[in-house]
Image (cartoon, helix red, strand yellow):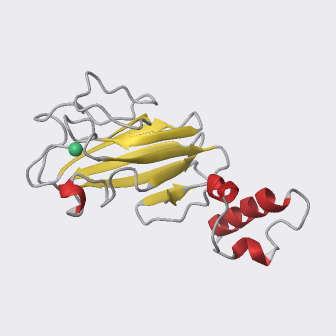
Amino acid sequence: MSKQSTILTLGAVTLFGCGSGEGDDPSASEPGSPTEAEAAVSAARSAEWIVVDDAARTVGITLVAAETDANNRWNFNGYANGETTVVVPAGYTVTVNFENRDPAHYHSVGVLAKAAIYPPIFDEATPVFDGAITAKATSMTEATAPGGGTESFTFVASQAGEYALVCPVPAHAVTGMWIGFQVSESGDSGLRG
Ligand SMILES: [Cu+2]
């Protein structure tokens, strides 16, 4: 599996430097308990809902609001409060296919700057990358509709860094409706944390 070998190679380069048998060291494949340096490299695991095409340099992300009851349904694919991070390679074109399964509340999603605490109300939600947000994202009545409403957007993850996938509907982000979004310089992809 090419993704696996990429991760192993990254681990080997980081831990042992170049030219010491990249990918061959058996310790590189042991999960073990990661050091801080290893954690920073963040070997991402694959997730069904993140589809990476390295040849086409594209990533498809299927993101479902209220997929589970976690965080009173204000979650993305069951995750809230930044407890996981979606990782995509820098330079790839990313399409987010968003569905709102909440029976009652409108939700939205955008790639926003990462913050320690999000405001209860966003005056405006400006995406980090052009086009990286659903329509009327700050509205409680015009964002993506409850009961299975769908929306998608596409953007180029042009700048490596740590960002977040945030629901900017009033009170949602501040109560945990956000997860991390990393654009990796290394080409790593998947789910971290
Ligand atoms: Cu929401």
Residue 27: give x, y in percent of width and height.
76, 75
Q: How many marks?
A: 0
Residue 72: give x, y in percent of width and height.
18, 56
Q: Residue at x 31, y 59 (%)?
A: 77
Q: Quadrant of residue 71?
A: bottom left
Name the quadrant where ligand 1 sits. Answer: top left
**Foreground residue among 15 and 65:** 15
**Foreground residue among 60 and 46:** 46
Residue 134: give x, y in percent of width and height.
29, 36
Image quadrant in which the N terminus is located: bottom right
Q: Residue at x 22, y 51 (%)?
A: 74
Looking at this rendering, what residue extends furthest in the right direction? 19
Residue 112's place in the image compared with 186, above or below, is above
Residue 78's place in the image compared with 86, above or below, is below
Does 47 sit left or right of 142 as displayed? right
Residue 156's place in the image compared with 41, above or below, is above
Residue 68's place in the image compared with 149, above or below, is below
Residue 66: give x, y in percent of width and height.
21, 56
Does 123 sit left or right of 154 as displayed? left
Does 23 sit left or right of 107 as displayed? right
Q: Quadrant of residue 109?
A: top left
Q: Residue at x 65, y 68 (%)?
A: 4
